[in-house]
Amino acid sequence: MYKLEANKDDVSYIATLTNLYLYLSVVDLIFAGISLLFFIFIRTHFIFIILLGISGALSYYEHKLYKQTIKRLLPLDNCYIDIGEDTIQISQVSDEGMYEFFEVYYDEVEKIRTLDGSDLYGVALYLKNDRDKSYATLDGEEVDRSIVPISFLGHEDDVFEKAYSDIVEKVSDDVEIDSSEKWKRPKQNSEIFRMSLLQLSLFIPYILSVLIFK
């Protein structure tokens, strides 16, 4: 059949997100500190306690996103999707920040579902409990996996969609398939836009509160 080599530099986008999450977590932590100082030394108004809580929660959330995305900053040189007559082989970067490999036999696929995460989009193959041919490795060590994620990190959207269609055609007719298109990758700037709006929702009331209650 054919083999899709990872050739899109999605790693640079993940690096951008990683830096964004880190910077925002630091900024919100500073906001939390300033809110506490205002409450203690300038005016004991409840609004600064609210801003302290919101800033602290956002900082924690952004730091959590930072730790998730930094794990995926690995080269994609050896990542591919190899679609064969009877099997599909996937080599990609895992959520744990390691390289994972899968060889899946189409006749051992039970369901196909959406794969969705902060920086991870694609589809997931659910394998039958009585499978005996498909297998997975994580950094070369064999592991037991009943769910096989197929990320289009490093693959052009249209090429990945064709591969997805070919996989659907090759599995048996009784396989349960999520026919929605929720798994499709959003535009890359959407996450940056979302985080910017989230930050503005804190920054604007924060500045207004400081000006009013100073």
Image: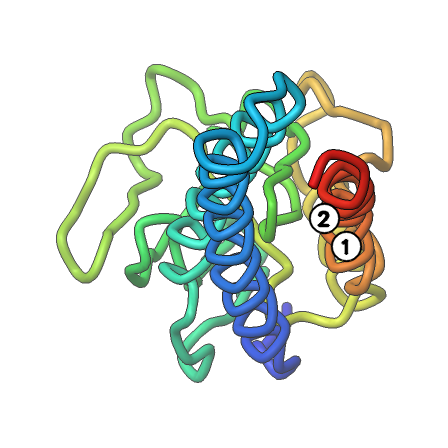
Q: Quadrant of the C terminus?
A: top right
The answer to which of 80 and 68 lies nearer the viewer is 68
Q: Is residue 128 above or below residue 162?
A: above
Judging by the rendered image, the residue that carries numbered circle 1 is: 196
Dot 2 crowding, Cα within 10 Å, few <14, some 14–19, many 20+: some
As rendered, which of 105 and 79 lies closer to the eye?
79
Q: Residue 128 vs residue 133: left or right?
A: right
User: Residue 14: in sight, yes or no?
Assistant: yes
The residue indicated by pointer 2 is 199
Residue 184 in sight here: no
For the residue pair 194 and 146, the one nearer the viewer reads as 194
Q: Which mark is residue 186?
A: none
Circles 1 and 2: CB atoms closer than 8 Å: yes
168 horizontally vs 79: left or right: right
Instruction: Give the percent coordinates (x, y) of residue 208.
Output: 82, 41
Of the 4 image quadrants, the one containing the N terminus is: bottom right
- Provide the secondary structure element on which disc 1 rests: helix
- Image x and y of residue 95, in percent: 39, 49
Residue at left 67%, top 23%? 47
What residue is drawn where x is 81% and y is 37%? 212
Q: Residue at x 68, y 46 (%)?
A: 167
Q: Amino acid at mark 1?
A: Ser
Q: What colour scheme was applied to this rendering of the protein?
A: rainbow
Q: Position of residue 115 (x, y in %)?
A: 62, 37
Q: Is residue 162 left or right of residue 56?
A: right
Residue at coordinates 79% horizontally, 48% vertically from top-left? 200
* Residue 190, position as x, y percentages in the image: 82, 55
Residues at marks 1 and 2, CA–CA distance in whole angstroms? 5 Å
Q: Amino acid at mark 2?
A: Gln
What element does badge 2 sit on?
helix
